[in-house]
Image (cartoon, grey):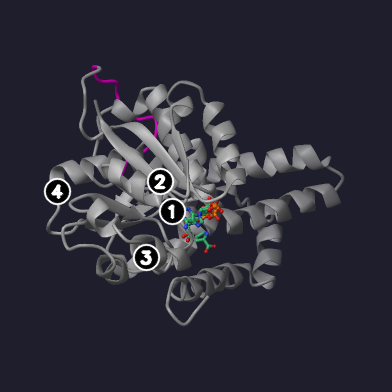
Amino acid sequence: MGYTLCVIGCGTMGIAILSGVIQSLQSRDISHSIPKWESHTPGTSTPTVDTPDPSLPSQFIASVTRQESALKLQHTFGSLGGLGASVQIVIGGNLAAAQQADVVLLCCKPQQARIILEQSGMKEALDGKLLISILAGVTLSQLTAWVLPSTKVVRAMPNTPCRIREGMTVVSNLPVSSDVELDRSIILKIFSSIGRCRFLEEKHFDACTALSGSGPAFACIFLEAMADGGVMMGLPRAEALELAAQTLQGAARMALQPGAHPAQIKDSVTTPGGCTIAGLLAMEDGKVRSTIARAIQIATERASELGQPTKK
Ligand SMILES: NC(=O)C1=CN([C@@H]2O[C@H](COP(=O)(O)OP(=O)(O)OC[C@H]3O[C@@H](n4cnc5c(N)ncnc54)[C@H](OP(=O)(O)O)[C@@H]3O)[C@@H](O)[C@H]2O)C=CC1
Ligand SMILES: O=C(O)[C@@H]1CCC=N1
């Protein structure tokens, strides 16, 4: 028997994480050994025997406030069958959900965190438990001030591709009060089962929020623009999108190979006097690099404002 994982605020990200974890458990990938503490490439591990593992979740609770959201969760998790159908969906019951849980994943909006954590009885419900916040901008010092010192608080910054188990999640270092081995294992089994996961110091979190948290949106602007170019040149829209998406996926996977560098991948495509260099120069004329890099800079600055008292 594993532990009970509760998601408080189960919207886009809560669904992405829970769906990914449940699918992973159902395909048994999550029980595979983790090759390294800090990073894991999906699909590279080997199966292990089916023994009860205290670092694996076996019961799930998803908490929201609206009936409409609950119906959506019922449909989404129900369609996964098995464990998905067993997810307990609660409306307006954060406290009872936290009381029942062993590990709580806080996935509400940044500005709701304080109200949820300071609800009467919540401190006691979280006593000694692992609380993982995915909230952009809400700092560890804010979170720890809203719970008892015995609550083990970490921040995680996942992204929407967790839903298809191709996510990128950055996790802050574990607190000293933590049972380091078990808690690291719990965290890695959640987030490595739905993509890559690595630990980084909290000071990098706003940049990670912008780069990998917001990144899928930025990447899709680039993807759409590539497809638009193809459509401009007469390609049908659906095929243009397929070509753009698969090309970005292929290039990204090449860049993730050990020892690879994006400049080397670019150079290998670029035949002297050919069409690639012509396109690259047009991109440089449009300041595409600084535009994209500045977008990450501005998003980082905005991330640092989220969940702060004077900002919305
Ligand atoms: N979207 C993304 O790509 C990423 C988001 N994040 C962070 O994840 C968090 C959630 O974002 P996202 O999933 O997009 O937001 P959503 O709005 O999709 O989800 C928020 C959920 O919280 C629920 N909720 C609202 N109030 C309460 C409450 N008092 N108690 C319990 N549940 C409540 C809402 O349901 P209902 O209305 O029924 O209450 C909703 O399901 C944010 O803090 C964001 O910074 C981090 C990484 C990536
Ligand atoms: O836009 C946002 O604020 C959230 C955080 C990262 C991605 N989405």
Residue beneath the point at 79% across and 48% down? 230
Q: Amino acid at mark 2?
A: Val
Assess whether residue 217 is covered by the magenta stretch. no
Sequence order check: which comes first, mark 2 or mark 1? Answer: 2
- Is residue 294 shown above or below 223? below
Give the label, 4 or 3, closer to the camera. Answer: 4
Q: Amino acid at mark 1?
A: Cys
* Other-residue count near label 3 (Cα within 10 Å), few / some / many at <14 / 14–19 / ≥20: many
- Is residue 311 shown above or below 269? below
Q: Amino acid at mark 4?
A: Val
Q: Which residues are magenta?
A: 39-49
Sequence order check: which comes first, mark 3 or mark 1? Answer: 1
Is ligand 1 less than 8 Å from the beta carbon at label 1? yes
Residue beneath the point at 46% across and 76% down? 305
Give the label, 4 or 2, closer to the camera. Answer: 2
What secondary structure do most residues of the magenta stretch adopt? loop
Per the image, the residue denoted by label 1 is 107
Q: What is the spatial separation of the Cα atoms under label 3 and label 2, in whole angstroms? A: 21 Å
Per the image, the residue denoted by label 3 is 205
Q: Position of residue 4 (x, y in %)?
A: 30, 36
Residue beneath the point at 55% across and 74% down? 294
Nearer to the camera, 156 or 97: 97
**Left or right of 154 in this view: 97:** right
Q: Is residue 3 visible?
A: yes
Per the image, the residue denoted by label 2 is 7
Q: SS at mark 1?
A: loop
Q: Quadrant of residue 103?
A: top left
Q: What is the spatial separation of the Cα atoms under label 2 and label 1, in whole angstroms? A: 7 Å
Nearer to the camera, 98 or 4: 98
